[in-house]
Image: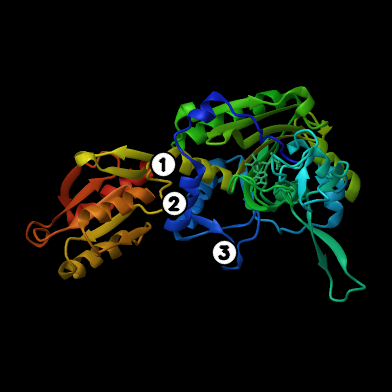
């Protein structure tokens, strides 16, 4: 069964949510964060492209995760595996037999729906006035969500393979090689960032439920006696990470899985949920997967994936605690969390994307007051852009240029004016307070860098 967290309910918080999804979707397209893939052909359902700002946001999020989860720890190492694994790996993991959603087809409108999204016997596409008898729904059938492809030069010799529906399975198949080559001892973890594919029956809520998406997953291998302890510790650490990304605490919560939601092999699972305009929804899962994955791959491959405790000589299959975050969902949550409309002087309103400086796609914008100042202003841009993503804009009214940067979340605007050449200073304007400070040109790079590096 795929992740089924998306509810149809409408809580009081949702009704009060200040942001309409359409506003964010429109802004994401017009400013170049995220827009439909192959848009010129009308788009393709469940596939999204990240534009110049979106790719920076996404890369910053992935880099923050990698830094925190892999580089800063001595007990976690990283890999980058192939998207396509041996087909037997997906039999061992249970995906070939069980990774499915029950679906129904409507014989009238020819659309397909998840059975749990049908109310009564009416097709969701049917106009209200249409009689129930006009809805001709099939019985629910299981629909495997893995996307398939064919490998091989000739049609006769082709083999069916799957685009991975989660990034963690190659971590399990690589477990022995990575442990030995990286000279790691249990307890330790393996992390990976990468694409995953699910043929979702009803992709929806912008990028929230896509058919191609990215996951950042970490599988932590430990002794059976330590599984509860490590689960608790990773649960805390993952929530800390989300807070450090800049989420408001009122927008985040844990949701433990009820016993009937747990996979048969799982001991415990908790979601980190964010309050989207369409309700509280999962952005990350922390799962105690037991020894299911290693045992199954051992059984199906015939390779021994057991470890030996050097001190006690005990031989055992390690237990796995998994942290699994969706990159696209977290980017979407960051944008929802950051988007603000506020009234400023003169009854004007401004849109501000209050992203933390570390996550913001553009760290600073260099804005010469006149095109005549472009030479020294471009030199400053070149200096700053050696270590960070910086924007240069010399077109139009300065107030409008500030607004454009506010809307995409640029934390600092650096204005080069006619006094700059004489006093060697520029004006740095901070996005949230709109406060301005005059600082020396030589100090600008370290001023911005210090603030960008202060948080995530
Ligand atoms: N290895 C465990 C696993 O894949 P999951 O709950 O199915 O667990 C983990 O997925 C995370 O991947 C989710 O919390 C979510 O952020 C992201 N995710 C899952 N399906 C997705 C989809 N169709 N579109 C976007 N993100 C998705």
Secondary element type, mark 3? helix
Q: Quadrant holding ligand 1?
A: top right
Disc assigned to residue 27: 2
Cβ of mark 2 under 8 A from ligand 1: no
Cβ of mark 1 under 8 A from ligand 1: no
Quadrant, the C terminus = top left
Q: CB of mark 1 within 8 Å of CB of mark 3?
A: no
Residue 408 rendering spot, x and y as whole percentages: 38, 51
Q: Which corner quadrant of the image does residue 235 belong to?
A: top right
| Left or right of 262 in this view: 50 | left
Disc assigned to residue 39: 3
- Mark 1 neighbour class, 10 Å CA radius: few under 14, some 14 to 19, many 20 or more: many
Secondary element type, mark 2? helix
Q: CB of mark 1 within 8 Å of CB of mark 2?
A: yes
Residue 350 rendering spot, x and y as whole percentages: 31, 44
Real-space Cα separation, disc 1 to disc 3, in angstroms: 25 Å
Judge by depth and name the residue closer to the eye, 48 or 366.
48
Q: Which corner quadrant of the image does residue 454 belong to?
A: top left
Disc number lying in front (1 or 2): 2
- Mark 2 neighbour class, 10 Å CA radius: few under 14, some 14 to 19, many 20 or more: some
Secondary element type, mark 1? strand
Dot placed on the residue nearer the N-terminal end, 1 or 2: 2
Disc assigned to residue 339: 1
């Amino acid at each position: 069964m795929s992740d089924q967290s998306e509810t149809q309910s409408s809580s009081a918080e949702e009704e009060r949510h200040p942001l309409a999804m359409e506003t964010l979707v429109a802004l994401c397209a017009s400013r170049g964060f995220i827009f439909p893939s192959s848009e010129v052909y009308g788009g393709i359902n469940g596939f999204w492209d990240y534009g110049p700002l979106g790719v920076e946001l996404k890369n910053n999020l992935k880099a923050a995760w990698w830094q925190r989860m892999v580089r800063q720890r001595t007990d976690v190492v990283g890999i980058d595996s192939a998207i396509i694994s041996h087909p037997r790996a997906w039999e061992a993991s249970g995906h070939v037999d069980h990774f499915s959603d029950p679906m129904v087809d409507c014989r009238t409108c020819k659309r397909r729906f998840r059975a749990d999204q049908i109310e009564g016997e009416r097709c969701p596409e049917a106009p209200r006035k249409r009689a129930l008898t006009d809805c001709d729904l099939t019985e629910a059938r299981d629909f495997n969500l893995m996307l398939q492809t064919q490998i091989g030069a000739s049609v006769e010799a082709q083999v069916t393979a799957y685009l991975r529906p989660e990034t963690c399975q190659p971590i399990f198949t690589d477990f022995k090689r990575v442990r030995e080559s990286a000279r790691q001892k249990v307890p330790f973890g393996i992390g990976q960032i990468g694409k995953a594919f699910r043929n979702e029956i009803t992709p929806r809520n912008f990028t929230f439920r896509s058919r191609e998406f990215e996951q950042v997953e970490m599988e932590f291998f430990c002794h059976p006696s330590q599984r509860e302890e490590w689960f608790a510790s990773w649960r805390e650490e993952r929530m800390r990470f989300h807070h450090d990304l800049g989420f408001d605490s009122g927008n985040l919560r844990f949701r433990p899985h009820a016993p009937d939601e747990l996979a048969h092999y799982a001991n415990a699972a908790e979601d980190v949920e964010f309050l989207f305009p369409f309700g509280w929804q999962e952005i990350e899962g922390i799962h105690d997967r037991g020894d299911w994955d290693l045992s199954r791959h051992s059984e199906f491959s015939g390779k021994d994936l057991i470890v030996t405790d050097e001190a006690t000589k005990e031989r055992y299959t390690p237990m796995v605690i998994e942290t699994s975050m969706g990159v696209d969902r977290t980017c979407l949550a960051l944008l929802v969390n950051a988007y603000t409309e506020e009234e400023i002087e003169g009854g004007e309103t401004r849109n501000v994307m209050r992203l933390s400086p570390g996550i913001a796609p553009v760290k600073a914008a260099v804005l010469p007051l006149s095109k005549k100042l472009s030479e020294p202003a471009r030199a400053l841009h070149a200096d700053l852009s050696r270590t960070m993503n910086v924007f240069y804009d010399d077109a139009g009214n300065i107030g409008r240029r500030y607004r454009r940067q506010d809307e995409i979340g640029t934390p600092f605007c650096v204005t080069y004016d006619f006094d700059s050449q004489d006093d060697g200073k520029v004006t740095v304007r901070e996005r949230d307070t709109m406060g301005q400070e005059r600082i020396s040109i030589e100090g600008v790079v370290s001023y911005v860098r210090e603030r960008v590096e202060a948080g995530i």
